[in-house]
Each structure stands twice: as structure tokens, then as C-alpha cells.
Image (spheres, rainbow, N blue to C red):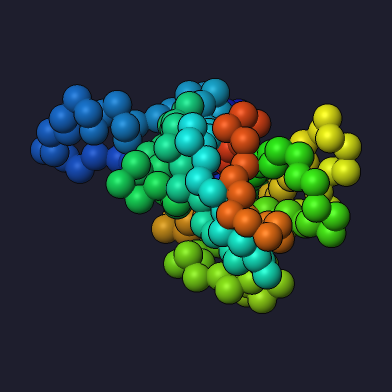
Amino acid sequence: MSPLSGSSQLLPVQRTWAAGETPSEGELDLNIRDAVNFLLSPPRVSLALGSPPDIQVGPPTVQVLAWDTEYIDTDDMWDPSDPTKVHFNTPGLYVVRAYLRYPYTAPSGVTYQLGIGRNTGGMWSSMATAPSRIAEDTRPASKDVNRSTSLWVSTTYPFQAGDYIEIFTAQTTANSYGPQATLNGVDARWVALS
């Protein structure tokens, strides 16, 4: 048997229809995938912050990011009515990346954090105590007036159907301070069965 022939050992089991069931055109578009089409267009999502919020002052207050721009979503992973969450409808191993850029700040000792949390409910008091944190980046602010501070987090994680992630950030400046509207986002892509 070819690895692309639909072997359930290599690909998720696809939706099937019962005898006499009449699927709508929309259901056919959303629920029927063969092995080759699944591999050519696996579940994935790419989101961004078109209007980044100000992140409240530390020490550090962790804030969940609400995404407002969708670039791609092949598996109904993001819902604008619940903009902080990326949902995993197809179980498997996913590569997840989050990135955020803060503009230059003058104070010394400023740090920024970016983290990915799984099934968190938006309830983190700090990055250090988050039990559902699966990845984090903490770094000092750039001291070069011509440079911003970029945070990047990437992980490979086995998600189950029904899991979700949220992206958190924190900063330690003395004021509310927001990330830049460029170079920010979150991406998730199915890569294998877990």
C-alpha cells in the first residue's frame, strides 16, 4: 500500500458518510479530503495583530493576545468571536511559532516575554508560574536606539482534537507599552500523527 493511499497509520481518519446521508455542498468542501489533498493542504493557520494592544506595566503582568487578522485557516482553527485562541480540530503533531516585536525603549533593565500556553483559559499570573506553558522566550530590551527587540517562540507539540493555544506577552517598562504592528503573529501547521 502506498503511503499516500489513505493508510490510517500515516494520516488522520477522514470523515465518512452513512448510507442515505445527503451531505451539503459546504460539508463536502469542509469534510472530505483524500490522502494526497490532506498532505498538500494540511491543517494550518496564520494570524497577526493588525492593531497591537498596549501591554500593561509589569512586574510583569501577563497579557493574552487577541488576534485580528487571518491570513490562512484551512481547518477552522480560529474564530474572530474568540480571538485569543487557536483551536486544534485535527489531532497530530504541530509546529507552532509565535513572534512579536517591541520598539526600542530607553530604560535599562527592561525585559520582554512571549509564551505559548496550551488549554490555559487565559489565566496566567506570570510566565514563570504558568503550568500549561509549552514554550517561552524572555530577553532584555535592545540597547541600540536603531533596533527593536524581537521575540520568537517555536515548538513542536502533539495536540489532541479540542486542544487550543493562546499566546501571552509581558514587559517590564514603567508604562503601558505596545508591540509594533509589523512582524507579529502566530502560525500552526500539522506535520504528522502524534
Tell me which corner region of the image, top left, top right, bottom left or bottom right, holds residue 133.
Answer: bottom right
Residue at 79% across / 56% down in the picture? Answer: 110
Query: Looking at this rendering, what residue extends furthest in the right direction?
Result: 144
Residue 159 lies, in percent from the top left, at: 55, 56
Residue at 30% x, 46% y: name it.
Answer: 81
Residue 57 placement: quadrant: bottom right
* Residue nearer the viewer, 98 or 66: 66
Q: Nearer the viewer, residue 175 or 153?
A: 175
28 vs 94, left or right, is left
Residue 106: % across, % down:
80, 46
Circle count: 0
Residue 35 in view (yes/no) = no
* Residue appearing at x 34%, y 42% in the figure: 80
Position of residue 108 relative to residue 32, above or below, is below
Please tell me which residue lies in front, 50 or 3: 50
Q: Is residue 31 left or right of residue 54?
A: left
Q: Give x and y (percent) for residue 74.
A: 43, 31
x and y percent of residue 76 in the render? Answer: 38, 39
Q: Tell me the quarter of the image containing the N terminus.
A: top right
Does any portion of residue 15 appear in the rendered image? yes
44 sits left or right of 74 in the view:
right
Q: Is residue 120 above or below residue 162?
A: below
Q: Is residue 13 left or right of residue 159?
A: left
Q: Residue at x 71, y 38 (%)?
A: 103
